[in-house]
Image: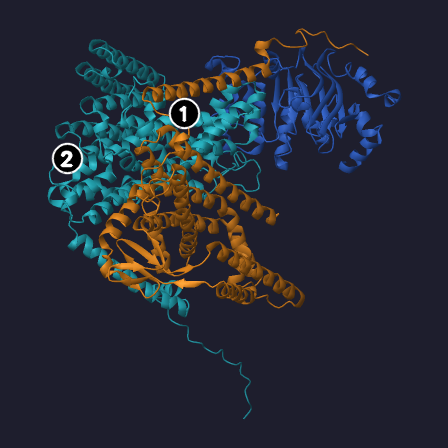
Amino acid sequence: MTAPATLDKQAGRPPLWRDVRVLSWTFQLAVVGLVVLLVSWLWGNVQSNSDRLNIDTGFDFLDQPAGFPIPGSDFRNNQPISDAVVEGLLNTIRLAAAGLVLATLLGVLLGIARLSGNFLVRTGAKFYVEFVRNIPLLSLLYLIYLAVILTVFPRPVDSWTLEGLAVLNVRGSNVAWFDGSALALIGIVVLGMAAAWGVGRWRTTVAERTGQPARTALFALPVMALIVAAGWLIGGYTLNRPELDGNRVSGGIEMTPAYLGALLALVLYTSSHIAEIVRGSIQAVPIGQGEAANALALSGFQRTWHVILPQAMRIAIPPIGNQYLNLMKNSSLAAIISYGDLTKVTELGVANRSPAVPAYALTLLIYLGVSLVISLAVNIFNRRLALVER
Amino acid sequence: MSDRDQNTDVEVFADATQMGGSGEVMIELSGVVKRFGKFTALQNINLSVGRQEVVVVIGPSGSGKSTMIRCINRLEEHDAGRIVVDGTELTNDLRNITEIRRETGMVFQQFNLFPHLTVMDNVTLAPRQVRHTPKKEAERLGMEMLEQVRIPEQARKYPGQLSGGQQQRVAIARALAMKPKVMLFDEPTSALDPEMINEVLDTMKDLAREGMTMIVVTHEMGFAKEVADRVVFMADGQIVEVGTPEHFFKDPTEDRTKLFLSQIL
Amino acid sequence: MTAIARAPTAVVVPVPGPVPRALTWGRRNLFRTPIDGMVTIVATVIAAYIGYRLFQFVFVTGRWDVVRVNLSLFLVGRFERNELWRPVVAVLAVAGYIGVWTGYSRTRTTAPIPATGAVIANPENPTTLGGGAAVIGAVAQEPPPPSADEASEVDDEGATPVERAVDMLGRLWPLIAGVLLLLSLATTATPWLVAGGTVLAAGGGYLLGRFVPTRALLVVATLGLIVAAAYFLWVDPFNWLGVPSSVGKALGVIAAAAVAATAAGLAFVRRIPAALVGVGLFGSLALLILLTNAVGWDDWGGLMMNIFLAVISIGLCFPLGVLLALGRRSKMPLIRIVCTAYIELFRGVPLYVLLLMAGIALGFFVPSSITPGLVTRAIAVFTLFTAAYVAEIVRGGLQSLPRGQTEAAQALGLSAVRTTFFIVLPQALRNVIPAMVGQFISLFKDTTLVGGALGFLDLLAGSQAATRQGDFRGQGLLGETIPFVMLLFWVGSITMSRESQRLERKLGVGTR
């Protein structure tokens, strides 16, 4: 067996300055080192500036009494700031949650309307979406709040009333709400949905066995309605209707003008983006899919429900998830019109002598946390859909 | 011939360096192992390729053929064993890696031409950037290479405007422009329409005739029969059998080889 | 009588006469089913009502004087009236520059592709590179009919100037309408002159770039730079750096001369795009100095402020964004962690909160000797924030690149840096141009936040300031000013997004 040819270059460990592994790690450590230097310089500046101005850099300020009220709630100035932060966060969640639900509903409707067979419906949706999508959210917010709610809405004495359901005026809007534990009601609704799902499964089994259409909705929805109604009565829930008495409004749940304005602006703006996403995702489903469905003699509804929508949804979920994040972050704009959300609370706190850097850092971290939660939820949902498809 | 049939691949190797090659060892792989996680793609590969030798590597998919030649120019990093190319060992030494990549040229299954550069720019990029060849000389060299692969008129076009066969020939010219000592081919014709395979194979045959050391992973048995000095059969990450084309296609030793050949011929 | 068997005559069914096209369209689009018909009727009533009220508002009852009188407030905020020539010069220079670029890129695309190089989409061919098409080059003896892809290209090149002008009108009508609207609200003749001048500058630049040979072009560029140098002699360009006046002027002249020489050299060796980019960068700096020399940028306002913030932020954030994207995809774990942390942090927090924080707390992060102005803070926040989004966009572009590209470059022996610079980035960046334009539009709209967060008098804040002026106070005129501002933003936004869609189609992006 011939010996291997003699090597010109020395085998074994290469010199350090040419070893790719050493080079790679040196580079990384250098970059990280730079970053650490930068961060410590910044932090050092914060410390020295704070010391110079005699300001704290810790989070002790959270235990101090707030010294400011939160608009639109009965938060009192002697409560600690940590309570204020919680209240602010709750307000943000109230705004964002309602916004997400309504924006999704409206957005999906508009997206489907943009593909409608009816010319007027199609064009109307197109005008709306193409306009709202291209304007700044803040301008929409100002228009709705400053130019509509504050100027057009009547004084309490002349409130607009929708009999027993809503009373609107410039000081606030009251909508009929229920009296009783919200948590328990959510539980009842969940129970109803579970029952509906169970009925759905039963109907599907029957349909598979007999070949007759399942008509799940026909069976499941009444069951859910029955359960919710039963729960309502048993739980002693009553409807709290708003009433106008002279210039006072009582009853129902009150939405401050700021809340209403912010909610409307967020919903109108985000729904236009969601509409575009929905439209795009339906159009992205290859046209052959619809043709195949037609060739199989599926009805229009069956074609949409079984063939088009499942595929369109899979395409649409990530960008819609992104819009959800945007809505949550855009909710911070409500602070501009003095809605007591997390941003507003931070502003008020800092104006009342809370140290700025820790306060804003905390706020940013909280928003980041909420973002991550929403992202996670969307990712899980997305993955579940994809798995189902495989 | 008969005593060779009984040989193990070590002894075949001993014979093989005296055939086809000019005698010197160009590439040597000893004990090369490559793992991807738990999966071992290469198990104890031993192969020597002589100067000016044409080695054709065949085998079923997943046998490790592509992994093996990709280890040679460090597109994959081998986990154990030694790889030596023209006296330079392939280690973590940046200088060695760069030198080996300069001396080996690779042609890919998917061509991997740079779509945003013209054909001429594709061919001259490396000579200008790596060997610091001045532009005029690089373009002269580039035209020479394009003439060698017989498409000089396409020099100013973009890859997207060429057929598959033309693109692959440009890829060969691009690799040749670096004046490599070894050319590695990773299934060069597998992505081509049938009518274009021959133009590429012809180019490769020309190269072999001119004395280029080549390692070719391919399914083109005709090419192997015509041009190869040795054929290497790999399966499941191991070299199963090595031999001359005559030995291989007429009367292979191993059962596995026989099975494979029966499936494709 | 024998019954004569007669072939039964064909039953003649009267063929219905041609139905007027409008009727079939109407039937299909408006009245397909009874419900559809009802929807149409209801929708028509609603549309008519809205249309009527809108018409009334815009043309009859709307009190547009508030916009008319405060037009300069909307456009430039409280910029000194007698220094307004500076923004005008800047607009003219930018228009001219864009004209030159457009004209120059025209000369490049009209170069004909050789006949054998006809482009046909071949779905069978797995070799999709770049434009996603393969050529039956040597095989075809005659140029095959142009595919849909090529047809648009042919239209662009083969259309007469009149046809091209009409096409541009159809595309850019929102922009043209918006400009005309602004002009119609003008109370003096100056805006008309400025608009006319801009069109002339753009047109002149276009002709220059298109028809003037290289050497002459570089003469023009040198002339422009001589003007800049003269300006630097007159003004003190670097005093904001704390450099004494004479040194600053000398530096300015030397810089202008150096750029002129470089641009001339580049143009001489036919590297026109590089020369143009160099001239553009230097020219931007010169314009910036021109604009800030009399009025520090803290006193800018109006639409000018929004555009300025958007442009400078996207320019500054671009290198950072590309670096972050490369870092996020790096194999080196520490780099990846650092870049991912940055990106996720800035993408998870609201921009408004960051702006508030910058307004109040930025001073803590820098030594007390430096007090950054409000505009500087805003630019810093926008840059850092947008860099994270740009990083995600570029990362998408990097991921869309097939791995074989880097492998081929590595196999050729190209170093990592050269691979990135010559192979990876050109392709990845070209693919993400539409997404980048989308991000710029977002940024442009987000610049309105500076009004609420930092108290600037940008375009949107101007809409409220206008209603507080003198006679207009307390008249509830926000219903006029805010929609006006919305319209301006809408015009800018939709023009940019349409042009980017067109660019997307032209470059064949996304068709692999």
Characterize the local packing of mark 2: few (<14), some (14-19) or many (20 or more) Cα atoms within 10 angstroms: few
Nearest to N terminus: mark 2 or mark 1: 2
Judged from this view, the residue extending furthest toward the front is: A78
Image quarter hosting the C terminus of chain B: top right
Chain drawn in orange? A
Left-right relation of B19 to A257: right
Left-right relation of B57 to A127: right
The residue identified by callout 2 is C193
Give A120 or B226, whichever is nearer the viewer: A120
Characterize the local packing of mark 1: few (<14), some (14-19) or many (20 or more) Cα atoms within 10 angstroms: some
Give B21 or B132, whichever is nearer the viewer: B132
Q: Chain of mark 2?
A: C
Q: Which hue belongs to chain B?
A: blue
SS class, disc 2: helix
Q: Chain of mark 1?
A: C
Residue A237 drawn at (x, y percent): 45, 62
Can residue C39 be seen at all in this image of the molecule?
yes
Choose mark 2 or mark 1, whichever is in front.
1
The residue identified by callout 1 is C319
Residue C488 drawn at (x, y percent): 25, 42
Residue A330 drawn at (x, y percent): 37, 42
What's the amino acid at mark 2?
Leu
SS class, disc 1: helix
